[in-house]
């Protein structure tokens, strides 16, 4: 559970402040002294929201705390501006090449929901790419100066062939930029994944004309699933992402219908419960309860229960890879490549 890693008064203060910000309200700080500010800043850095906390500071914050958070904010701002500049090149190039794609997660949220590019840490650009267009994607990215990255210990092109994802890197000065292309939606019911492409819309933001993004209900499902399958439902940064999308929901009916169609009712239920509990977001209780009792494919539910538990997460993710493979040939290839990878390197990845 998300709250398991958060203890003490500073965590409560951090939740309250960020929850207030997510609702578009002004944060009122009371009863703060130097020691509490230092502890709050440390907690914010631990959970990846130090840049956001910096923008919420009042005038009487200790100089050392302000300087530390300002440094995090400025580093995030510089990196994110660079990422968005590169995204402004990638989007039209992929569209002109006929690639079907959508910008998702951090890059999409920075462009559409965060009002300040320094408030969210982003380590890469995430693109959801139609699997049939993967071969078009690669030469376009290479023409833009990106190099395909293949670092998996299980062999060349393992990620693309067996995990439906590939990544690219590009060095800009001292920064190594990354772009990840996801050819599948882990945690979505296999038979319904093709429907995601009917949920793509476009927005004109951050100097990018008609950037393809998922609709708010579909993106909310995507983020909730990612939050629990890949992060065990832990991490304030990811919960803030969910909260910001919750604030943009205009039709809860569409959220529920998408969750039922995609087989994501359980992760969406838990994420909405958490943003209401910890960040005080106004989520309709009847929606939370409806999602709680809607059925979910049994096989996917079992994998979900494994993935969201830290002690079983590694095994759960490996089984999820096998589950979402398109055929048994791919599943057997995945198992063989994993088993024949160098033993010491396999162990190092598990640590």
Image (cartoon, rainbow, N blue to C red):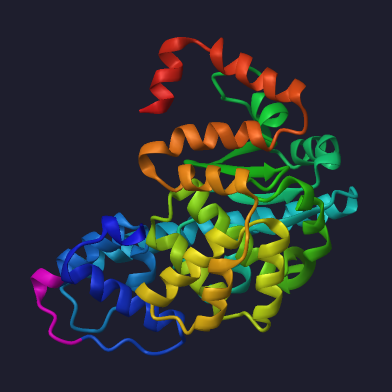
> What residue lies at 38% left-to-right and 62% top-to-bottom?
236
Where residue 339 appears, as percent x and y from the top left, is 55, 13
The location of residue 346, given as percent across then percent down, is 45, 18
Q: Who's the residue at 81% across and 52% down the image?
A: 194
Looking at the rendering, which quadrant does residue 311 occupy? top left
**In the visual, does 204 lie left or right of 177?**
right
Q: Give left or right: position of 323 versus 318.
A: right
Q: Residue at x 55, y 64 (%)?
A: 268
With respect to residue 114, does 90 lie above or below? above
Q: Number of numbered discs present?
A: 0
Stretch in magenta: 30-36
The image shows residue 160, relative to residue 42, as above or below, that is above
Residue 264, magenta (yes or no): no
Which percent across, then down, holds residue 242? 52, 68
Q: Quadrant of the C terminus?
A: top left
Q: Is 67 placed left or right of 133 in the picture?
A: left
Q: Between residues 113 and 130, which one lies in front from this camera angle?
A: 130
The answer to whether residue 120 is visible is no
Q: Residue placed at 85% from the left, 55% from the top?
A: 95
> Please, is residue 62 above or below residue 120 in the view?
below
């Amino acid at each position: 559970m998300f709250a398991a890693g958060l203890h003490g008064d500073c965590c409560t203060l951090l939740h309250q402040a960020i929850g207030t910000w997510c609702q578009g309200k002004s944060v009122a700080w009371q009863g703060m002294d130097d020691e509490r500010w230092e502890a709050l800043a440390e907690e914010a850095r631990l959970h990846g929201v130090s840049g956001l906390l910096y923008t919420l500071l009042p005038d009487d914050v200790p100089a050392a705390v302000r300087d530390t958070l300002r440094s995090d904010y400025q580093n995030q701002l510089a990196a994110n501006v660079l990422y968005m500049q590169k995204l402004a090149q990638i989007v039209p190039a992929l569209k002109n090449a006929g690639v079907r794609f959508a910008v998702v997660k951090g890059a999409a949220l920075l462009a559409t929901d965060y009002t300040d590019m320094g408030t969210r840490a982003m380590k890469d650009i995430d693109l959801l790419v139609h699997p049939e267009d993967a071969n078009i994607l690669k030469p376009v990215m290479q023409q833009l100066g990106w190099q395909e990255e293949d670092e998996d210990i299980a062999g060349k092109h393992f990620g693309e062939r067996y995990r439906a994802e590939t990544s690219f890197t590009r060095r800009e000065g001292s920064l190594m930029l990354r772009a990840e292309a996801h050819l599948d939606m882990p945690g979505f019911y296999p038979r319904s994944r093709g429907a995601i492409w009917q949920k793509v819309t476009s927005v004109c933001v951050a100097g990018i004309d008609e950037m393809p993004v998922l609709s708010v209900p579909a993106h909310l499902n995507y983020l909730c699933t990612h939050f629990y399958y890949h992060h065990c439902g832990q991490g304030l940064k990811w919960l803030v992402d969910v909260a910001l999308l919750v604030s943009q929901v205009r039709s809860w009916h569409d959220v529920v219908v998408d969750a039922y169609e995609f087989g994501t009712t359980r992760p969406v239920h838990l994420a909405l419960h958490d943003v209401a509990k910890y960040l005080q977001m106004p989520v309709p209780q009847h929606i939370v309860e409806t999602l709680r009792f809607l059925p979910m494919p049994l096989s996917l539910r079992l994998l979900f229960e494994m993935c969201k538990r830290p002690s079983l997460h590694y095994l759960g993710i490996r089984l999820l890879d096998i589950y979402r493979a398109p055929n048994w040939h791919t599943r057997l290839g995945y198992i063989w490549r994993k088993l024949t990878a160098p033993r010491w390197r396999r162990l190092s990845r598990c640590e």
